[in-house]
Image (cartoon, grey):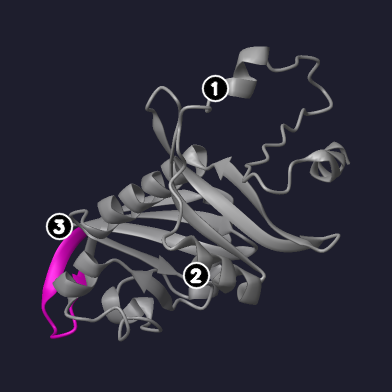
Amino acid sequence: DDALRWLDRRDPDRPFALLVHHKAPHRSWEPSREHFTLFDDIDPEMPKPWAEHWERMRKAGSRTLEGVKQTKDGRRFPAEVSTTFVEYEGEEFMFVFARDISGRKEIERRVRLTEYSVEHAQGHIFWVDSQGKITFATQSTCEQMGYTPETIKGVSVYDIDPHAPKPWVDHWERMKQQKAVTFESSTQRTNDGRRIPTEVNVNYVEFEGQEFHFVFARD
């Protein structure tokens, strides 16, 4: 509401940037007065030419992009910027909302690092469902076992390990109780029939409403 009242009083011939500070209801502090002039000597990077950007935004209505912002002291941080084209009392404006996404980017980086580490780990790593079918295997596992990521999906655990516990339904129920087990002497069979002696660690996992066996086997 204060922002709209300010728009009524502004000089229509002067360009402006409107920054609205949101104070969370559980906080009692107010920003220091110096913050109101912190960016007076900074020229924000604008799309060029601006007229073409304005027309694109008028047609699009809104858009959200990720980019990098810079503070007055030179610190750069990733930001998600949402822009909405609005008309108010016969005038046109762009309402821009930007938020720091450093935390989200760090989580995404850790996820990528974890995936990379798992994909390139030595040993055989795969997921098995309640029917004894492989639902996922790492790239290195597929290469060592003679499959592709597509062809290994749906392969029976008995095609990989002929000596896996039988019947599978009983083994599955036991794993629900035990949660983890290690088979110190096992043999895995590759797609071309080769046999590899392995030690197999199996963990029962529930994830997003689904149940799996997380299997890690090493020569």
> Residue 130 at x, y = what percent?
54, 72
Residue at left offset 40%, top offset 84%: 154
* Cβ atoms under marks 1 and 3 closer than 8 Å: no
Q: Is residue 108 above or below residue 215?
A: above
Quadrant housing residue 20: top right
Residue occupied by mark 1: 38
Camera sees residue 141 = yes
Left or right of 140: which side holds 24? right
Q: Find residue 136 and report its horizontal and vertical position in percent.
A: 38, 71
Type of residue at label 3? Asp
- Using the numbered discs, state the Cα–Cα distance from disc 1 to disc 2 in whole angstroms: 29 Å
> Relative to residue 211, is residue 27 drawn left or right?
right
Amino acid found under the numbered disc labelled 2: Glu
Q: Nearer the viewer, mark 2 or mark 3?
A: 2
Q: Position of residue 103 (x, y in %)?
A: 50, 38
Please tell me whether residue 9 is drawn above or below residue 185 in the rendered image.
above
Q: Say above or below: 174 vs 188.
A: above
Q: Is residue 185 visible?
A: no
Q: Of discs 1 and 3, which sits in the foreground?
A: 1
Badge 3 is on which residue? Answer: 219
The span picked out in magenta is 188-198
* Mark 2 lies on residue: 52
User: Residue sitting at 18 percent across and 78 percent down?
Assistant: 190
Mark 3 neighbour class, 10 Å CA radius: few under 14, some 14 to 19, many 20 or more: few
Q: Secondary structure at mark 3?
A: loop
